[in-house]
Every structure is written in C-alpha cells, then in structure tokens.
Amino acid sequence: DAGVIQSPRHEVTEMGQEVTLRCKPISGHDYLFWYRQTMMRGLELLIYFNNNVPIDDSGMPEDRFSAKMPNASFSTLKIQPSEPRDSAVYFCASSRDRSYGYTFGSGTRLTVV
Amino acid sequence: DQQVKQNSPSLSVQEGRISILNCDYTNSMFDYFLWYKKYPAEGPTFLISISSIKDKNEDGRFTVFLNKSAKHLSLHIVPSQPGDSAVYFCAAMDTGNQFYFGTGTSLTVIP
C-alpha cells in the first residue's frame, strides 16, 4: 500500500490566488482528516469525513476554506482567496477508526507570498 | 513505505509506574523528532521534541530518548497518571521540513 498520498508536496502562490490541496486516503479507511501544522499552534484539525460525509468542520478557520470528498479515494482542501497567514504544512490522514491508527500523508507545504 | 513505525498498537500501565512508548524510523536524514498526544474526539497536540544532535530531552514527567545508531526513539512517562491515557504519535521531520508520522500507540493508565 502506498499510504496516504498528498499533492503537491510544495506550493508557493501569491496572495489572493486559489489553492487546491489533494489527498488520496488508504483504501478501506472510512475516515479522512485534514490538519494544519504551524509553529505557533501546532497541529490543528480542520475537518474530518466519515464515509465521504463531512462530520465536523468546526476547525475550518473561515469561509475561505472548503473541503470536499467526492468519493472514497479522493479529497480536496481549497483556499480561496489565499492569504499569507495561511502558510503552513497541511496534512491529510486516514483511519479505519476515528480514535486510533491514523496514517498521515507527508503533507503539503503551502507558502503564500 | 512507512518511514516512521510504532510497532505497539497499545500499551497498558499501572498508575504510578513508567510508560515507555517506542518508535523506529528508517530515514537517516531525519533531523528532528516529535511526540504528539491525542485524546478521543480531539486533534493531536504537541508533547515534546528532540533534535538529532541530542540523545535526551526532558520536560517534567516526559523524557524522550534518541538512539541514532539504532534509528530508535522512545518516550518515557514517569510516573504515569490516568490522564495520560491517550494515543501517542511519533513524528519525524526531514531536512526539507516534511513531517512523517507513525500510526500511534494507545496508552491506557490503569488507576
């Protein structure tokens, strides 16, 4: 199994542009999580899905952020418009069980200039 | 391929005793290691870290040990408390600032 696959690995964009981060979870994992890692706040849960349905999006910082999971093998996190304060590493993780056994992707390092 | 491995899915320890959580990695280019703690229904929170130039870092009841030759690190919690019951993730960062997480070890501290 290739694990959780995220793309791109690095993204540099200008303020105001739309950014789309992508994630392919492990096959058979019913839960998918999006996290944001910053030095100031550590690892924050943004949103998670169960069976492709968003369950808790209370961690999404504001309306500029949106996430979708059109099928069991793909999810996107979109930021529109992007701002410099969105610069962080964004992780996707998947799990069979919500409370244990997460597998994290390698992350996408986003830099908004 | 999983570059950071936590081979023990679960661990049970009596209150007051030492908890030892283990983590192995494969990439010698990792230069920074972290432990995260996660309670159910919450995201992981940072616990303690260690740079590859050190072999030990201590913070209160938590100590992380790094053995670079063995590509192994461990988290010691002493004394263990019931509130320490959680899932613990080991993570490593490479020189390109990319993170790699283990799959976690569920610790149960028995009162």
Image: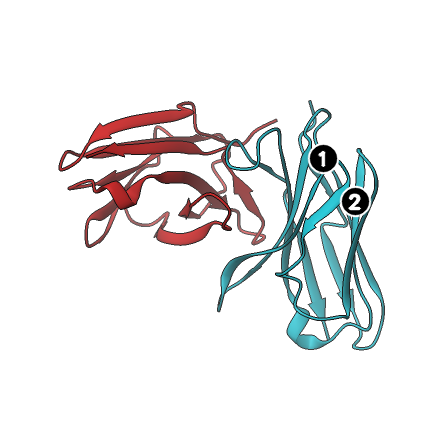
Chain colours: A cyan, B red
Image quadrant holding the C terminus of chain B, namely top left
Q: Which mark is residue A75?
A: 2
Q: Could you tell me residue B49's position as x and y percent?
A: 36, 52
Q: Please give the count of numbered marks on the rendered protein.
A: 2
Per the model, the C-alpha gap separating discs 1 and 2 is 8 Å
- Same chain assignment for discs 1 and 2: yes
Q: Quadrant of residue B78?
A: top left
Question: Which residue appears at 77% of the width and 39% of the height?
Answer: A52
Question: Which residue appears at 53% of the width and 47% of the height?
Answer: B94
Q: Residues within 10 Å of mark 1 (few under 14, many from 20)?
A: many
Tell me: A73 left or right of A106. Answer: right
The residue pinned by badge 1 equals: A25
In the rendered image of this protein, does residue A82 appear above or below residue A78? below
In the rendered image of this protein, does residue A111 appear above or below residue B81? below
> SS class of the residue under badge 2?
strand
> SS class of the residue under badge 1?
loop
Q: Residues within 10 Å of mark 2 (few under 14, many from 20)?
A: many
The answer for which chain carries disc 1 is A
The answer for which chain carries disc 2 is A
Q: Could you tell me residue B20's position as x and y percent?
A: 26, 32
Between B21 and A10, the residue placed more toward the observer is: B21
Closer to the chain start, of discs 1 and 2, is 1
Amino acid carrying mark 2 in the image:
Ser
Tell me: A1 left or right of B102. Answer: right
Question: Which residue appears at 29% of the width and 43% of the height?
Answer: B84
The reply to whether discs 1 and 2 touch (Cβ–Cβ < 8 Å) is yes
Between A84 and B107, the residue placed more toward the observer is: B107
Q: Is residue B81 among the parts visible in the rendering?
A: yes
Amino acid carrying mark 1 in the image:
Pro
